[in-house]
Amino acid sequence: MLLSSLTLYGQRAPVVDLLTLEEHLNQKDAEVHIVNFWATWCGPCVKELPYFDAITNRRDRRVQVTLVSMDLDLNPDPERVRRFVEARGIQSRVLLLDEADPDAWILRIDSTWSGALPATLILNHKTGQRTFIERALQEGELEQYLPSIP
């Protein structure tokens, strides 16, 4: 269910619930879907955002990047995230997750996730492989998870 949306650099940045996020994750409009869970208040999250935008800026239709902001959990003002995204020129798709009880949905994203940020889920729709990384990525590391794409 789409709750509301903002426009960021010509993109839609909707506030979504878990059901909408799960529907988005299950779309097979790309071979590989990289989903990063982050927040503006998380230093390691902010540091790795350019790595995801570098993948987005390749404009490879086989790879889709989605950045799922967890900010609404602590600050219910989506405008704060909008200003953050605009100030940094983020080009990747941004979703704002609005779910009040993290314990009720974290394990639905990945059964091993403790809830710590940053966290990245890589779905290879072509092979069915799922990779979950619950830590900050280093520069160049993200590309190591994409070798199956010729």
Image: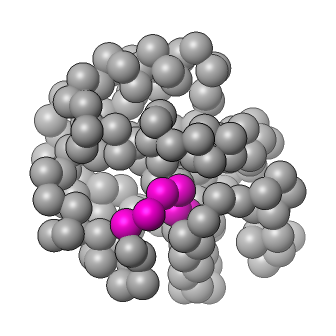
**Residue 30 appears in the rendering:** no
What residue range appears in magenta? 115-120
**Residue 131 point in image, percent of width and height:** 58, 79
The residue lying at 45 percent from left, 15 percent from top is: 83
**Residue 79 point in image, percent of width and height:** 32, 17
Q: Is residue 116 magenta?
A: yes
**Residue 126 point in image, percent of width and height:** 61, 78
Compare residues 107 and 92 and report the one nearer the observer: 107
Residue 111, picture quadrant: bottom left
**Residue 49 point in image, percent of width and height:** 65, 41
Q: Is residue 82 left or right of residue 14?
A: right
In the displayed structure, would residue 130 be above or below residue 146?
below
Q: Is residue 42 left or right of residue 15?
A: right
The residue lying at 58 percent from left, 46 percent from top is: 45
**Residue 124 appears in the rendering:** yes
Q: Is residue 106 magenta?
A: no
In the displayed structure, would residue 71 be above or below residue 19?
above
Compare residues 106 and 34 and report the one nearer the observer: 106
